[in-house]
Image (cartoon, rainbow, N blue to C red):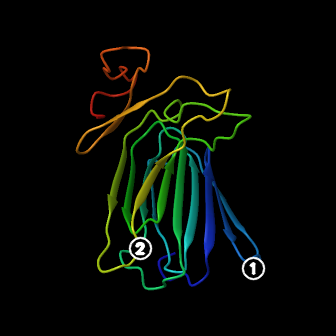
């Protein structure tokens, strides 16, 4: 897909990969898989939208273009759920971690993130910046939540704990 000239939306959900032209000009493509060890996708330079709800045992490597050749092309990724590692490289305009939140429906963004997410954003002369957005719960339905960030890691924070210590994560010890 690295040579793709159309802006595409990629949806990956529990073993099903759907690819659609965001302009609605061409038809869509679907791929069904089971027990794939690793997905590696190199995105084109016309702009990409990605929505991931990962499944066992798949690891994911998403390679966005390393240069912002097309100044109007936006690369947006949302990692809603994963149990295994996710590696993202290249120019990503916005990386959203967690499910979308609204005033009616909110949940802590890390509830469905059980695997490590590695984001290696590059600029290489691009005017675009890389942003990471934690879609925290909002509104009266939002649970108590907080985040701790050090030089390289973001982790859940027990907001009830007055000492501000991180909540132990139930996943592998290799996570931050």
Q: Is residue 33 above or below residue 163?
A: below
Disc sitting over residue 53 in the figure? none
Residue 43 at x, y = what percent? Answer: 49, 71
Return the residue at label 1: 26
Residue 97 at x, y = what percent? Answer: 50, 45
Kindly indicate the quadrant of the structure image that contains residue 120: bottom left
Count neighbours of disc 2 (C-alpha within 10 A) and say few if under 14, some if 14 to 19, many if 20 or more. Answer: some
Relative to the observer, which residue lies in front, 113 or 159? 159
Residue 139 at x, y = what percent? Answer: 66, 33
Per the model, the C-alpha gap separating discs 1 and 2 is 28 Å
Identified at 63% across, 44% down, the residue is 100
Identified at 52% across, 58% down, the residue is 77
Relative to the observer, which residue lies in front, 108 or 140? 140
Of marks 1 and 2, which one's residue comes earlier in the chain?
1
Identified at 50% across, 40% down, the residue is 82
Disc sitting over residue 128 in the figure? 2
Kindly indicate the quadrant of the structure image that contains residue 64: bottom left
Left or right of 76 in this view: 62: left
């Amino acid at each position: 897909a690295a040579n793709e000239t159309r802006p595409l939306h990629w949806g990956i959900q529990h073993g099903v990969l759907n690819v659609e032209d965001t302009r609605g000009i061409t038809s869509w493509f679907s791929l069904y898989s089971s027990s794939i060890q690793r997905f590696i996708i190199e995105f084109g330079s016309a702009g990409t939208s990605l929505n991931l709800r990962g499944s066992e045992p798949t690891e994911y490597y998403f390679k966005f273009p390393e240069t912002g050749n097309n100044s109007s092309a936006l690369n947006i990724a949302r990692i809603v759920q994963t149990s295994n590692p996710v590696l993202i490289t290249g120019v990503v305009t916005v990386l959203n971690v967690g499910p979308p939140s609204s005033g009616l429906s909110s949940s802590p963004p890390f509830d469905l993130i059980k695997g490590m997410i590695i984001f290696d954003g590059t600029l290489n002369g691009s005017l675009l910046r890389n942003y990471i957005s934690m879609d925290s719960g909002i509104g009266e339905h939002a649970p108590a939540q907080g985040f701790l960030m050090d030089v390289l890691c973001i982790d859940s924070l027990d907001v009830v704990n007055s000492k501000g210590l991180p909540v132990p994560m139930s996943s592998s010890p290799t996570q931050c």
